[in-house]
Amino acid sequence: MKTIDEVDRKLLRLMQRYPDRAVMELAESSGMSHTACWRRIKRLEADGVIERKVVVRDLAALGFTVNVMASVRLKQHDENTLEAFESGVQKHAEIVACFSMSGDSDYLLRIIARNIEDYERFLKKTLLHLPGVAAVSSNVALKKVKLTTEVPT
């Protein structure tokens, strides 16, 4: 892990909270010159601390009202099966997160859908046919209590 100091942490907090701020504004808020701030941002990007910058969209406003957490168990756990499953997951935009898990399930997926019928179709036509899938257990979210991209720094 790269070493980051308190100035980096302050800059990262500002960038998370105010992603549209120009470098000059970030510099003023963090007490740095424009050039020093720009250099820090570039270093944080080069070091992989800043992975990418994204726009967070309101899924409900786009018609995606259903969030499903699907636990997936695979038939086998050999390297080819794991890689084939993970590659298959990458091909489907409805799967917005995938985690390899310890415990009872092999993977935990977050899947978005426009409605329950849309998810059921995705489950039957796609998810159950991904390489190596033995079983899927779906949990539908009732409401969003917290969802953030901010992380403590």
Image (cartoon, rainbow, N blue to C red):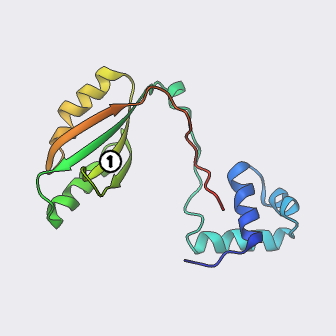
Q: Position of residue 106 (x, y in %)?
A: 25, 53
Q: Nearer the viewer, residue 104 or 144?
A: 104
User: Secondary structure beneath disc 1?
Assistant: strand
**In which quadrant of the rendered image does the N terminus lie?**
bottom right
Residue sitting at x 29%, y 20%: 117
**Mark 1: few, some, or many residues within 10 Å (few <14, many ≥20)?**
many
**In which quadrant of the rendered image does the C terminus lie?**
bottom right
Q: Amino acid at mark 1?
A: Leu
Q: Is residue 98 left or right of residue 76?
A: right
Q: Is residue 94 left or right of residue 148?
A: left
Residue sitting at x 34%, y 45%: 109
Q: Position of residue 63 (x, y in %)?
A: 46, 24
Instruction: State which quadrant residue 38 falls in.
Output: bottom right
**Rendered position, 123 above or below 42:** above
Residue 119 visible in the picture:
yes
Residue sitting at x 14%, y 64%: 78
Q: Nearer the viewer, residue 35 or 127?
A: 127
Give the residue at mark 1.
108
Instruction: State which quadrant residue 23 falls in.
Output: bottom right
**Rendered position, 41 above or below 151:** below
Count numbered badges in the picture. 1
Residue sitting at x 67%, y 71%: 42
Q: Nearer the viewer, residue 49 or 147?
A: 147
Q: Position of residue 113 (x, y in %)?
A: 37, 29
Residue 93 visible in the picture:
no
Q: Position of residue 108 (x, y in %)?
A: 32, 47
Q: Is residue 12 left or right of residue 77?
A: right
